[in-house]
Amino acid sequence: MPSQAEKGRLFKERHSKPGILLLPNPWDAGTAKLLASLGFEALATTSLGMSNALGRVDGDGAVSRAELLENCRVIAEATDLPVNADLENGYADDPKEAATILRDAAAVGVVGGSLEDWSGEKIYDFNHAVERVVAGVEMARSLPVPFTFVARAENLIRGRPDMDDTIKRLQAFEKAGADVLYAPGLRDLASMKLVASAVSKPINVVMSAGDPALTAAEMEAVGVKRISVGGALSRLALAAFMKGAREMKDQGGFTWMRDTLPTKDLKPIFGT
């Protein structure tokens, strides 16, 4: 198994190489191993997927800081792949206090992580948001392993569809030293191209908000570097679960058994 430092170096290098980086989002060790078995290059955690697994409504405060970090540890230890973590807003408004979650995430094995400019109630004022990114960059650079720091501008998914302000924030986050820039909520190629052309650092797009008809190749062509899916794979799994359970309850039927993964196929994956 590669060391954490090797994972961190490889993850950073991957962002500068040609080609788009697909980051699927597992929510536990099992789903991490399944995704690794398919040949993905890296993984990213999901707050929604974790909340779903715990039977909680995703949102501010649904998962504690300690629970989030434990989920990071479980996923980081499950495979040899680099893991990028959704670290919410760092569970603090204060820039330096929020940045400590990067240190703690690195301590449990992840090699990349994002901080939001959302307090849980409002978008942080511009200057405060930039100060938080500055603190995050300082913390990321102080870590004993290479760490990819992702700065998120939450406007578009927080009821504030202000593209000008979103771009202004991403440009400031880039200037502050963030390695990757992320504005959840970009849906079409035009908006993705607009954002990607406004900055020079890698852009992450989450397809839980994007047009599902788009392909990775199309997004790469307009400047997107990374694609994640948030909690969408979790919701897909739950949709299949509920479809089978409804057939069982409403019809006394079990045709859904035909679509299950055979245990013989799971054993070699989970046995690694």
Image (cartoon, helix red, strand yellow):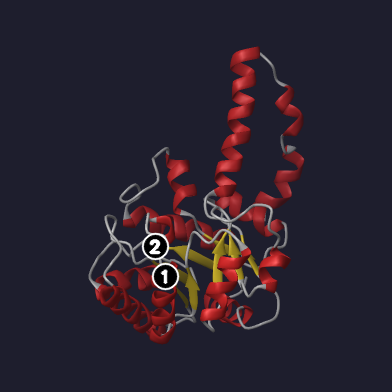
65, 117: nearer the viewer? 117
| Residue at (41, 86) in percent of width and height | 175
Looking at the image, residue 35 sits to the left or right of residue 52; the answer is right
Circle nearer the N terminus (1, 2): 2
Q: CA distance from mark 1 to mark 2?
A: 6 Å
The image quadrant where one finds the C terminus is: bottom right
Q: Quadrant of residue 129?
A: bottom left
The image quadrant where one finds the N terminus is: bottom right
Q: Amino acid at mark 1?
A: Thr
Q: Which residue is mark 2?
A: 155
- Residue 28 in picture, x, y percent from top left: 53, 50
- Residue 24 in picture, x, y percent from top left: 61, 58
Residue farthest along the left direction in this orientation: 94
Instruction: Count neighbours of disc 2 (C-alpha within 10 A) and say few if under 14, some if 14 to 19, many if 20 or more.
Output: many
| Residue at (35, 77) in percent of width and height | 133
Q: Are marks 1 and 2 in contact (CB under 8 Å)?
A: yes
Please indicate, yes or no, whether residue 88 appears anywhere in the rendered image.
yes
The relative height of residue 50 versus residue 36 in the rendered view (above or below) is above
Looking at the image, residue 9 sits to the left or right of residue 112; the answer is right
Mark 2, secondary structure of its residue? helix
Q: Quadrant of residue 92?
A: bottom left
Q: Amino acid at mark 2?
A: Asn
Q: Which residue is mark 1?
A: 166
- Residue 80 in picture, x, y percent from top left: 62, 66
The relative height of residue 65 versus residue 176 in the rendered view (above or below) is above
